[in-house]
Amino acid sequence: MKRAAKIAVILLVVLAAAIAAALSFGAEWASPFSANAGEKAIFFDIRLPRVLLGACVGASLAVAGAALQALLRNPLAEPYLLGVSNGAALGTMLAFVVFGNYILARPLLAFAGAAAASVVVYSLARTRAGMNVERLVLSGVIVTTFLSSVIIMLTTLLDAARLRSFTFWLLGDLSQATWSGVYLRFGAMIAATLVLASQSRALNLMMLGERDAVDFGVETGRVRLLVFGASSLVVGAAVAASGSVGYVGLIVPHLLRLAFGSDNRIVVPMSAIAGAAFVVLADLAARVAIAPRELPVGAVTALLGAPLFIYLLRKN
Amino acid sequence: MLEARNISVKYGDAAVLADASLLLSAGRITAIVGANGAGKTTLIKALNGSVPIGAGEILLDGHSLSTLSRAAIARKVAVVAQETESRFPVTVREFVLTGRFAYGSSFGWESPDDLEAAERALEDCRLENFAGRLMNSLSGGERQRVVLARALAGEGRVLLLDEPTANLDLAHQTLMFRLVRERCEQRDYSAAIITHDLNLAAEFADEVVMLAAGKIVYKGTPQEVLTRDNIREIFNVEVMLDTNPSSGKARVTQLY
């Protein structure tokens, strides 16, 4: 407990520093204390919500990744790689095309899409003998590519201007951040983090094997439902705002396990804080790397994540 | 005390266990023997409710197993299963502490009681010096002892052991059986052990249960059950039987 508190303080300091850095740098100089109304507007209406949305999205994806990895006994499980993010993306697109006027339709359908993709991948990967790592990864690939092709077909319904912003969004993009968007993601992220962290002791057993968990007193069905439910909720909310920012759920829990061990009571809640810092910094890199033009933040995280994935796959 | 009354288990349409009755009473060790695929592991799984039974009932200290929560069962019944390798780096102490899950909430840290029980179990299994090591750095036999230590840490008074000595050297096979024997004799634990080693069964068990094709075929003391005819019938091998001169128990020698 004491150790967890210490780690939390360290990571919160890192997160605060990341947020401060992300607020200070950008294509334009912007200060909250400036007398210049334009500068002030850049800070409060554009940069601040963007940085905070990045933090919420990062926390959401990382905490979902950490919990899914323990539940599925697979360090390679990650919302993006399992197809859960793409499920949410398809839900968002459907909402956009069909229910364009209802703001809440997007996160709701994103949640439904993420939940549906989770269930499909899980049932594809599961055999009577249990679940094996390669089968889970392959099921993820199949669901991801299938959903991608449906998304591509749907984009043909869009006009040219919307198409460009959609392509950017699909790759993971925080530039459309609004305050109302931040509030919704923050709420979803806090709720899901609490639910997932509350299951972390049970996840310590699930991580060792489903039979171990049943033998030692875990109601595995309930844990599975809570983890899939909470992670779908939070991934749906994140993806509806920022598209598929990939590999966050892979990189962050992996680094935390390297540093602090595998205890999920540390890895799961700390993934939220570290994931927030990670995406804030990745988005800062995306904004300044080729300023004044921007990269999608998903391109930056994938650039870091894909090599790590290959490394983990080889190590296994 | 754990009692199975006429239980049956089906996987799909195939009956894996049919009409099996078994009483594990305090202070006694029951050895479960039989050929591969006879239903031994399924029987153990049914006994702690981790596979559903199709017919019959199981009573744990007088309560039907189906009315108890997983945690309530885990506080009374400890399992040593074949260990599956985890891909996550977990230390021996963390692993043993998972055996205390049923005493806490799903979140939260272990109490001083939990930590003490884990340390005691590590000592009993001679694993004090391994506590900080990672599970995947241990040999098969060392891991098997850690799995036993976790079961003992849970302090369940019914022990279900699925081939606990499969990976152990001679000294540790004896340590494992002595530990179980000691718990049964001194603390009134009861134990069911699946084993392929008929001599260990003869040496340490009070009762031997022979399974074939999902049915309990013979049940009784080692002397009653481990006979040449029974072994020929169940395992399809010829054996010679005599008495172990040091312990006076039955000794089985296979004839090749």
Image (cartoon, helix red, strand yellow):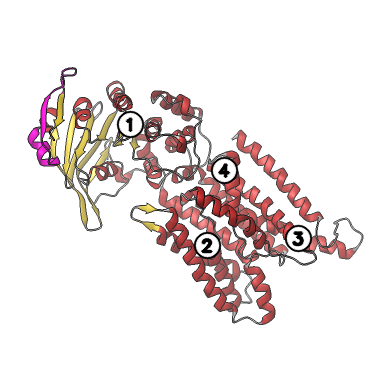
Marks 2 and 4: which is nearer the front? Answer: 4
Instruction: Give SS at disc 3.
Output: loop
Dot 4 alpha-carbon crowd within 10 angstroms: few under 14, some 14 to 19, many 20 or more: some
Q: Residue at x 85, y 61 (%)?
A: A40
Label count reads 4
Instruction: Give SS at disc 2.
Output: helix
Amino acid carrying label 4: it is Arg
Marks 2 and 1: which is nearer the front? Answer: 1
CB contact under 8 Å: marks 4 and 1? no
Q: Quarter holding the N terminus of chain A?
A: top right
Marks 4 and 1: which is nearer the front? Answer: 1
Q: Work out whether mark 2 precedes mark 4 in sequence or the reverse, and give the earlier one.
A: 2
Instruction: Give SS at disc 1.
Output: loop
Kindly report the distance in space between the C-alpha atoms of the residues bearing marks 4 and 3: 29 Å
Query: Along the line of sight, which residue is nearer the eye, B57 or B182?
Result: B182
Question: Vertical placement of B147 versus A67: above or below?
Answer: above
Q: Are marks 2 and 4 on the same chain?
A: yes
Determine which residue is flagged by label 3: A289
Determine which residue is flagged by label 4: A257
Identify the subunit bearing mark 1.
Answer: B
Determine which residue is flagged by label 2: A84
Q: Residue at x 41, y 59 (%)?
A: A125
Residue A154 in the image, given as x and y percentages of width and height: 56, 78
